[in-house]
Amino acid sequence: MTRPIKAAVVAIAGIAVGAVAMSAQRPAPVGATMTHELHFAHLAAAGEPHAAHALMALNAVALQAAPQNMSLPADDAGAVERLAQSPRKGEFVTINVNGTPMRTWVVRPQGQGPAPVVLVIQEIFGLSDWIRGVADQVAAEGFIAVAPDLLAGRGANGGDSTSFTNQKEMMQAHFALPAAEIVTKLKAAREYGLKLPNANGKSATVGFCFGGSQSFLMAIEEPSLNAAVVYYGAAPTDAPGGGRGAPFVPTDRMTNIKAPVLGLYGGLKEDPGIGAGIAPTQEKMKQFGKTYEVRIFEGAAHGFLRAQTGNNGANMKASQEAWPLTVNWIKKYAS
C-alpha cells in the first residue's frame, strides 16, 4: 500500500504561489545545492502550472478528512479508509510495456454487464492511495477502472512509484517523463482494459493535474478514445519549454481529436497558471470543430477533488458538481 500524501492547505494557495515566485527570483548562494524546492520554484515562476502544485504539496499541512459521501471519491485524507471498506475487489496487475513491467491498479464494477474502460491518470504523486480510491469510485459508477503507474521503470533499480524514497524525488520524476513514454504506457493500459471480459469496447480517460494534461494528450494521440475528462490540467502545447513565460498556445495537433473533452477547473484567481490557458484552448478547439465543454468553479483551488475540505467550502461545492458531470460525460459518450 502506498503512503497517503498530505492534502495541501489550498485556502492559502495565492500566498503560496506568490512565495514561489519570490523564491525563484532570489538567486541561490554561490556553491548552493539546487534543492527540489528551489527547482520547483523556478519552474513555477517560469509558468509550469503543476510545479506550483508540487511546491504547495511539499509544504502541506494535513486537512481534516471530508465526511463520507459515497457519491464522491474520498478525498486524500479519507482514501485509505474508503478503500478498506470498499465492496469491490481492486487488484494490482502487471502490464508489460516494451519490456518494462508496469504495475496497474484495476477495479471492476460489481455488475456483470458490459462496461466502458476508464483510464484513471495520476497526479504528480505517483500511483497513490488517493488515485486508487478514485479508481474504486469510478468502478462504483459502473465502469472498469484502470490506473497505471506512469513511473514504472523510473524509480531506483527500474522501480515504480513504490521505489522512491521521498515525495520530492517522485514529483521531479514526473516532470522528466517524456510525452511519448506516457502515451505508450497509457495506450498499453487501455489495451489491457479493453481485453477484459466485461469491457464493452469503448474507453475514456480521467486525469488530475499532471494527469489532466495527459488525459487531454490521450484525446490527441488515441483516435479510438470515446471521451476524455480533464481536471485542472493544461492542454498540450508545442511551444518550447511547454510555453512557459509566454502566452499559452495550444497545439495544432488538436485537429486529431475525436473524443469529446470535458474540462473541470478551479477558479481563475485561485489557479491562474491553469486558468490562463483555458480561453486559448476553447478558441483552438472551436476552430477545429471539436467538442470541449468547460466548467470553472470560482473560489475552488487547483486539486479541489483531492482536498475537498479546503478553500472555505468552495472545494467541496466544486467536487459535488464536478463528479456527477464526470460520470455523466463518460456514460453519454462511452456507454
Image (cartoon, grey):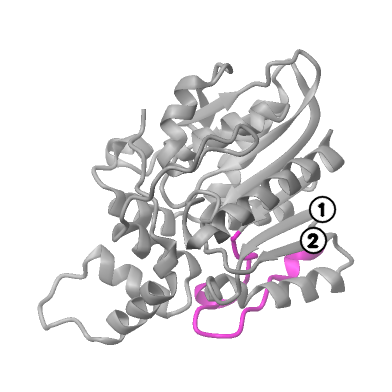
The residue under label 1 is: 260
Number of numbered callouts drawn: 2
Image quadrant assignment for residue 324: top right
Our reading of the magenta stretch's main secondary structure is loop
Name the image quarter holding the C terminus.
top right
Q: Residue 198 appears at what percent x and percent y?
A: 75, 18
Q: Residue at x 49, y 56 (%)?
A: 178
Q: Residue at x 51, y 56 (%)?
A: 303
Choose between 162 and 185: the one closer to the eye: 162
Q: Is residue 173 magenta?
A: no
The answer to whether the residue labelled 1 contacts the one labelled 2, judged by CB atoms less than 8 Å apart, is yes
Image quadrant assignment for residue 57: bottom left
- Residue 146 shows up from this direction: no
Q: Is residue 244 magenta?
A: yes
The residue under label 2 is: 293
Q: Residue 88 appears at what percent x and percent y?
A: 58, 18
Q: Mark 1 or mark 2: name the one nearer the start of the chain.
A: 1
Left or right: residue 272 compared with residue 17: right
Choose between 115 and 156: the one closer to the eye: 115
Q: Is residue 95 above or below residue 8?
A: above
Q: Is residue 30 above or below residue 170?
A: below
Q: Which residues are magenta?
A: 232-255
Choose between 214 and 86: the one closer to the eye: 86
Query: What amino acid is found at the position of numbered circle 1 in the picture?
Result: Pro
Query: What amino acid is found at the position of numbered circle 2 in the picture?
Result: Glu
Residue lying farthest to the left in this orientation:
31
Q: Residue 76 appears at what percent x and percent y?
A: 44, 43
